[in-house]
């Protein structure tokens, strides 16, 4: 179908308010937060309710038109770039929090609600929406569910998938299904809810999401430890966890990040250190006092430790957290393009993998800084390059392929929390095996027989 | 007139989208193209010749230019500069709004500036010892001449000269970036030493051209004087007073604690929800985009009404005009007053 026909038919179906197709709108939706991926859609629709979503998907099904559901477009794996044209369905108009139940500790939301807005609302009830991806101030719950977004609290609290109880979703045919619900215990049928979490818009479009909430911790406390190298930091992390502490925060920065952050934010960090370890915990005052002090002691006693400081107050703790949060922008300022990667490895292999990443940077003549979640082995190697320098662009492509081979060698994963999208699809089969890949394709066909939902991504 | 954007400024954006929740026009529409990230995507498309520059016209006009996206940007994108470049590229020839052409014509001529000052009882001309000059502003001198009088009364050390032009913020924000810079430089030569201004928008523009060390916005300057202020009383009670931040003062210069510090001495200070958000005046915006400007301000008017304030203080003439107009329309009794005038009321007692 021609783009003009597509727009005319969708407008007839939904009205002018919901459909846009001017060159400017199309251009604005041609990318997400992933560098180097771009594709022009043919039309943008912004439905306001489940019935409209169902109508749009049925239309796409009947006309075999590709359709991509999009939240805030803050994903980092090119999961929402319309590489095949078609329809981009923006879910941001469906942004109502439908219910918060304090006694059941759940909330029911539309997919376009942002993570932070939900968390701020439930805070009034003494509750917390636990998943805290770095993009939480902008990313939507729908997007969080579609990528099973992670965050800084993964080790202690898990990720988005641990907090989704039920879904209302539109299948690739336009049919509306409900999975799970408000119950803690419910094993009726296959766990379709869990299957849809992380499905990146390839199986169904979420229209209503029931999330589990948790009590809000009374307080939190943080400290920082410096080590000669990352191996020493990783050894300390191992000792902390085997000592029986399950901390909320265990984050690290390598020396490249450390120097970039200090140059940018002037926090007084020890830039001579090979690695910075940020540790912390949340809970009631007494228990976090104990656990954080114990972590500090363990770090101090570890070999290769250059020093440990506990944050005296909230402001000091904020400064430490800021050091971690500003790692990416601090690195990004070094050149015109930064490629933020996301691999996950067993914690034991972490130090070795970071060393190998450094070597990959050197052999390809590239600057790579690595930061990440030391508690769960989720690493974010970040390549900083000049996008107008063809040598560096080619070197970056080669380096990326080498980096993605690392998790396979060490029993890890090609993506810990960002998702597969288009960026990692070439590496997916290598990670999950051909039989599993075939199963994913079969599953995709059951949910989306016409192959219209986010085509070209997982299982297409 | 420019044809291309500064590439290094475009390159800073990592498209993370952190700016989206801070943007008033994104809040109104939920549309990517009406967000700072979306607009930068459009600018990049123009830069790469994928989109004709003229296609930027609508978004360059819809954007308030409040720069609320800048403090929340982790990558330090200078969106305000990019917007000025966007208007410099698009608001040319017949695409320059008639109102803007008219305003330029007035402040570009000596006669126009003279006319603006005519029958406007601004501060009297005087020469003081200190190297500190009060800037009248172009439209502030016409619309709110009492502001400069209040400052002159408060500080005998301030020099007041009638021979001063416009600072060029009007030009820089409306498609004449280079001319705007030239005007700031010209003004800085006419008013040597430190320039004291009662307009947040002018302060930010001047500081960006001639350097922050030569520019003092009123609240910045006043808090350094460390003069204790008596609270203003009404029927024996401290007055209830709120603040409307100036976007460019807050987002461009990082000045927002200072006016609050002053207001806490003057009365019972109430933080209006969204006091940091744009009031929709946004320079010429209230004239060019009346409907959208009103949409942006509507929640604020309801909030001010609900708080039952005696005064809402402002630090920029555009905000004063916008709030006076909109509060009157909504029949809210709260009086809109420039911070300097409120200080003068307290000081005289």
Image (cartoon, rainbow, N blue to C red):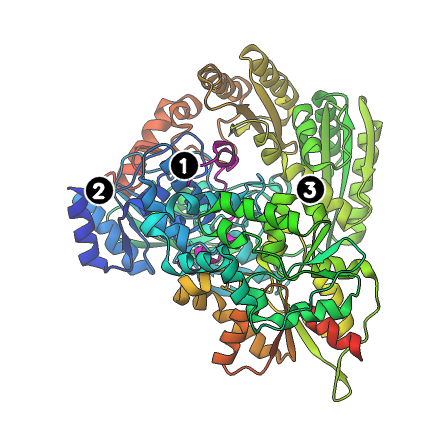
User: Which range of residues does the magenta coloring cover?
Assistant: B1-30
Q: Given this view, does label 2 or label 1 mark the residue nearer the observer? A: 1
**Mark found first going from the N terminus, 2 or 3:** 2
What residue is shown with label 2? A65
Q: Residue furthest top?
A: A363
Decide: few, some or many residues near mark 2? Use Cα within 10 Å; few <14, some 14-19, many ≥20: many
Please give the label number shown on residue A321. Answer: 3
| Residue B299 is a magenta residue | no
Is the residue marked by circle 1 packed among few (<14), some (14-19), or many (20+) residues within 10 Å?
Answer: some
The percent position of residue A398, horizontal first and vertical second, equals 46, 15
Answer yes or no: is residue A197 visible.
no
Element at badge 3? helix
- Element marked by disc 2: loop
Question: In the displayed structure, would residue A88 be above or below residue B148?
Answer: above
Chain identity of mark 1: B
Front residue of A353 and B158: B158
Residue B275 vs residue A39, the one in the foreground: B275
**Residue at image point 82% right, 46% down:** A312
Residue at mark 3 to residue at mark 1: CA–CA distance:
32 Å
Q: Is residue B346 above or below residue B199?
A: below
Q: Quadrant of residue B135?
A: bottom right
Residue B4 is a magenta residue: yes
């Amino acid at each position: 179908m021609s783009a003009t026909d597509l727009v005319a038919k969708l407008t007839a179906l939904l009205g002018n308010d919901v459909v846009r197709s001017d060159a400017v709108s199309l251009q604005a939706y041609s990318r997400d937060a992933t560098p180097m991926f771009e594709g022009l859609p043919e039309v943008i629709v912004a439905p306001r309710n489940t019935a409209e979503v169902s109508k749009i998907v049925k239309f796409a099904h009947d006309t075999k038109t590709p359709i991509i559901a999009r939240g805030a477009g803050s994903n980092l794996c090119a999961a929402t770039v319309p590489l095949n044209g078609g329809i981009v369905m923006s879910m941001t108009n469906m942004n109502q929090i439908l219910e918060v139940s304090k006694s059941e500790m759940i909330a029911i939301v539309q997919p376009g609600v942002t993570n932070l807005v939900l968390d701020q609302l439930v805070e009034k009830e003494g509750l917390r929406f636990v998943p805290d991806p770095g993009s939480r101030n902008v990313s939507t719950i729908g997007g969080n569910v579609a990528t099973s977004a992670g965050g800084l609290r993964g080790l202690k609290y898990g990720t988005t998938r641990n907090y989704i109880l039920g879904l209302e979703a539109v299948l690739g045919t336009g049919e509306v299904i409900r999975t799970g619900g408000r119950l803690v215990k419910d094993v009726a049928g296959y766990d379709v809810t869990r299957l849809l979490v992380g499905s990146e818009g390839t199986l169904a479009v979420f229209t209503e999401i029931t999330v589990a909430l948790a009590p809000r911790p009374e307080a939190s406390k943080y400290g920082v430890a410096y080590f000669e190298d990352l191996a020493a930091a990783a050894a300390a992390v191992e000792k902390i966890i085997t000592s029986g502490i399950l901390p909320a925060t265990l984050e690290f920065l390598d020396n490249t990040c450390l120097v970039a952050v200090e140059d940018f934010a002037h926090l007084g960090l020890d830039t001579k250190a090979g690695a910075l370890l940020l540790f912390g915990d949340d809970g009631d005052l007494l228990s976090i006092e104990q656990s954080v002090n114990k972590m500090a002691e363990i770090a101090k006693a570890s070999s290769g430790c250059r020093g440990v400081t506990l944050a005296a107050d909230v402001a000091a703790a904020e400064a430490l957290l800021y050091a971690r949060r500003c790692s990416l922008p601090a690195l990004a300022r070094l050149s015109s393009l930064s490629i933020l990667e996301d691999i996950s490895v067993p914690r034991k292999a972490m130090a070795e993998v970071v060393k190998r990443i450094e070597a990959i940077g050197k052999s390809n003549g590239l600057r790579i800084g690595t930061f990440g979640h030391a508690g769960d082995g989720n690493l974010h190697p970040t390549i900083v390059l000049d996008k107008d320098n063809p040598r560096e662009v080619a070197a970056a492509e080669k380096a990326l392929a080498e980096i993605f081979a690392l998790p396979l060698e060490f029993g890890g994963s090609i993506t810990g929390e960002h998702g597969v999208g288009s960026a990692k699809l070439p590496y997916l089969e290598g990670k999950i095996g051909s039989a599993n890949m075939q199963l994913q394709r079969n599953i995709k066909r059951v949910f989306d027989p016409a192959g219209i939902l986010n085509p070209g991504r997982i299982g297409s | 007139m420019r044809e291309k954007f500064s590439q290094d400024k475009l390159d800073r954006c990592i498209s993370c989208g952190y700016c989206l929740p801070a943007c008033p026009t994104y809040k109104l529409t939920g549309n990517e193209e009406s967000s700072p990230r979306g607009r930068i995507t459009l600018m990049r498309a123009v830069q790469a010749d994928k989109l004709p520059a003229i296609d930027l016209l609508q978004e360059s006009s819809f954007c308030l230019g409040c720069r609320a996206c800048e403090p929340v940007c982790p990558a330090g994108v200078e969106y305000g500069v990019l917007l000025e470049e966007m208007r410099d590229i698009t608001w040319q020839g017949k695409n320059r709004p008639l109102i803007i052409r008219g305003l330029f014509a007035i402040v570009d001529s000596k006669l126009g500036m003279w006319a603006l000052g005519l029958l406007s009882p601004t501060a009297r001309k005087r020469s003081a010892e200190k190297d500190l000059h009060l800037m009248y502003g172009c439209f502030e001198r016409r619309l709110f001449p009492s502001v400069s009088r209040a400052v002159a009364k408060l500080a005998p050390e301030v020099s007041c000269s009638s021979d001063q032009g416009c600072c060029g913020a009007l030009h820089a924000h409306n498609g004449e970036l280079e001319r705007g810079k030239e005007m700031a430089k010209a003004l800085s030569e006419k008013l040597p030493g430190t320039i004291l201004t009662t307009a947040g928008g002018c302060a930010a523009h001047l500081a960006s051209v001639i350097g922050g060390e030569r520019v003092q916005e009123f609240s910045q300057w006043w808090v350094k004087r460390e003069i204790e202020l008596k609270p203003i009383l009404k029927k024996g009670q401290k007055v209830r007073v709120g603040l409307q931040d100036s976007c460019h003062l807050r987002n461009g210069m990082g000045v927002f604690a200072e006016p609050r510090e002053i207001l806490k001495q003057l009365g019972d200070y109430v933080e209006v929800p969204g006091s940091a958000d744009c009031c929709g005046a946004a320079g010429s915006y209230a004239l060019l985009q009346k409907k959208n400007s009103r949409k942006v301000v509507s929640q604020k008017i309801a909030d001010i009404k609900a708080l039952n304030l005696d005064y809402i203080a402002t630090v920029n003439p555009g905000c004063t005009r916008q709030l006076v107009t909109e509060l009157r329309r909504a029949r809210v009794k709260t009086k809109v007053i420039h911070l300097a005038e409120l200080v003068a009321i307290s000081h005289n007692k």
